[in-house]
Every structure is written in C-alpha cells, then in structure tokens.
Image: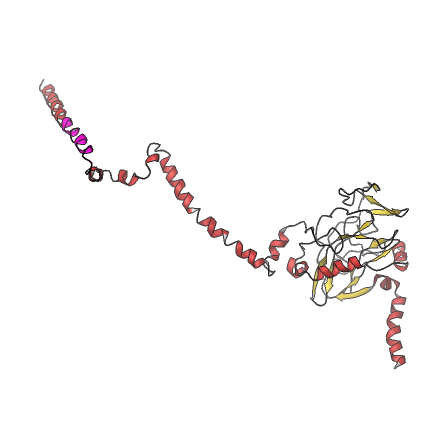
Amino acid sequence: MLSKSWRLSIVPALLLMLSPTLSSAQVNVSVSIAPPELPVYDQPPLPGDGYLWSPGYWAWGDDIQDYYWVPGTWVEAPQPGYLWTPGYWAANGAVFVWNAGYWGPQVGFYGGVNYGFGYGGRGYEGGYWQDGHLFYNRAVINVGSVHVTNVYNKTVVNNISVTRVSFNGGNGGVRAEPTAAEAAAARGPHVEATSAQRQQVETARGNPQLRASNNHGRPPVAATPRAGNFSNPVPARNAAAPARNATVGAEHPAGGAERPAPQPRLSTPRPAPEANTGARDIAAPQAHAAPVNPPRPAAVVEPGREPEHTQAPKPAPKPQVRPAPKPAEHPAEHPAEHPQENEHH
C-alpha cells in the first residue's frame, strides 16, 4: 500500500520535473473547444504607484461547462522587482491546454498572444522596475490623473501582426515559440497569482453575464479598476453586448418588455398628430377658415337652412336677412327693364 501511494504521488512530480515549462506554467485545464477571440476594450486609469496591469483572458469553468471572461485589472506586485507573465491557451492536438500566469523577475513566454496594453506578444512594454520603483510608459498604459512622477514615453513598434486570437498553435492560433530568455524566466523563481487576482477569477466565474454563451465574446465587464473590485467596470468597446445579453439573461426580459411598451405609446400619438397635421395642412391655405375649425361642418352644409334654424330663435338676424334680399329683388327688375330698352333701341 505504501509503495502504491508513493508511486501515485511521485509520478506526477517526476513528470513535472521532466517538463520545466509545464511545471512553471502550472497546466491545470484542458478543453476540447477553442477559446473565443479577445474582446476590444479600454484600459482603466492607473490607480496608484506600484500597480501592474494584468490583462483579461478567457478562463474555463468545469462547473459551468463554458468559457468566462476574467476582466483585465490593476494588481499590486507581490514584491518589488516582480513582473507579471500572463497565462495563455495552447493547442495540443485536439485539446486546448491552459498555462497559468505567474510573477517573476522577468516576463516569460505567454504564447505570443497580443493582450495589449504593453503585452504585445513578447515581454512587457508598459513599464519596468528601477531601485524598487515602477516606471510607467505613458505611451502604452493609461496613467490617468494619478500623481506619478516616474513616467516616460516610449513608442512601441509591434512587428507582429495584430490579431485578437487568444491561443497559441493549432489551427488558426498564434505561431510563436519561447525564446531562450523566456524559457529561462519560466525556470527561474516565480510565485503564483496573488489573492486579489484569485478573487478576480472567482468573482468573474460567478457572474453569468461574463460567460461566452451569454455575451457571445463581448463581455459587459471587460476591465475593472482594481483586482477584486467590480465597481465602475469598463465594458467591451462594442456596446452591442448588453443588448444581445438581454435576450439571454433573466434580468433582460424585463428590459425587453419595456421596449414594446413605449412602442404602442409612440404609435397612438402618431395617428393623432397626422390627423392634426392634415387638418393644419388643409387649414393653411384657408387662413380665414383656420380659426373657424369648429363650425366647419356647418360651412360644408351651406344651404343656409341650418344656420336659419339655428338662428331662428334669434329675432334679430331674421329681419336683418329678410330685408336684404327684398331690396335685391326690386333692383333686379329694373336692370332687367333697362337691357330690354337697350335692345329695342
């Protein structure tokens, strides 16, 4: 029994010793589905001196059987002089293997994946340590309004084709191999992710909106100001992600129900203004008839009878109207006589 238990414990250790790259990278996950492309997002401003950028990446959850996005964030280095080597996915035959990131004096190999913000596929161009202080490259990272005096500007020319591919090797993956310096960094002293970084992962895993099946590769929380702090998050640059999530998430059907509600509201007033505009268009040429909109039906039925009946109870209008036509009839006879006389002449 002791020999069996010894063999079971020593064999994995021997395998890790025979493969220094795997032991340093801490391979712990393998998936048969390729990770989604990296989303495009903006970097939140630097929160203070001593923070390093940890780029976002797609992680796999066995419990949820899906990829989920771990937002990029600012992290305090575990000790002065240590830099972060991001983790990366690598194709290995029919599966994709996750190589976890680590802290160390030098940046190691991270699959050639272009995570951005100084991680262009090789090394880190966002800053460096000197005399126990971090110097930040303002041309690469978002320094923001924080009071940091140790800054510099260095333009980074990336000769590698910029893609959003999130894995190394395989079909469609990044073609990159570790250099001698990167391999030495992997074999050198390093430490695992900090507790704040692990909290970032756990918080992301518990958020259904960060799952690839829900956000379709466009996470609504792409970056956070600090590790483990999801307040004031930065969404993916393409804002269509929340709208698409609305059809999937449980919270968004209510939002979808709100959208049809305003539609009937907009449709009900639309016929009303159309009728009003139509009436206004008709009334526009008739400038004098416009103020008399209510009596238009009486004006349309202008036989003179309806106004007489309506005005019949009023004695004043009747005598005023009747004498007017009477004198009109007498002068009508005289002009008729005059033309007859002219004809005779």
Q: Where does the image place residue 267, in percent across and percent down from the top left? A: 45, 49
| Residue sitting at x 82%, y 44% | 136
Residue 326 belongs to magenta span: yes
Q: Is residue 328 left or right of residue 101?
A: left
What range of the chain is rendered magenta? 313-328
Residue 93 appears in view: no
| Residue 167 quadrant | bottom right
Q: Is residue 33 left or right of residue 312?
A: right
Q: Where does the image place residue 268, in percent across and percent down from the top left? A: 44, 49
| Residue sitting at x 39%, y 41% | 276
Point out the residue furthest to the bottom here: 1
Q: Where does the image place residue 132, in percent across and percent down from the top left? A: 89, 48
Residue 128 appears in view: yes
Say how many tags the image has. Answer: 0
Residue 109 belongs to magenta span: no
**41 up-or-down from 318: above or below:** below
Q: Quadrant of the C terminus?
A: top left
| Residue 247 quadrant | bottom right
**226 up-or-down from 155: above or below:** below
Q: Is residue 6 left or right of residue 48?
A: right
| Residue sitting at x 77%, y 65% | 29
Q: Quadrant of the N terminus?
A: bottom right
Q: Where does the image place residue 129, in percent across and percent down from the top left? A: 87, 48
Point out the residue furthest to the top here: 345
Colour scheme in use: secondary structure
The residue lying toward the viewer, choosing from 68 and 76, is 76
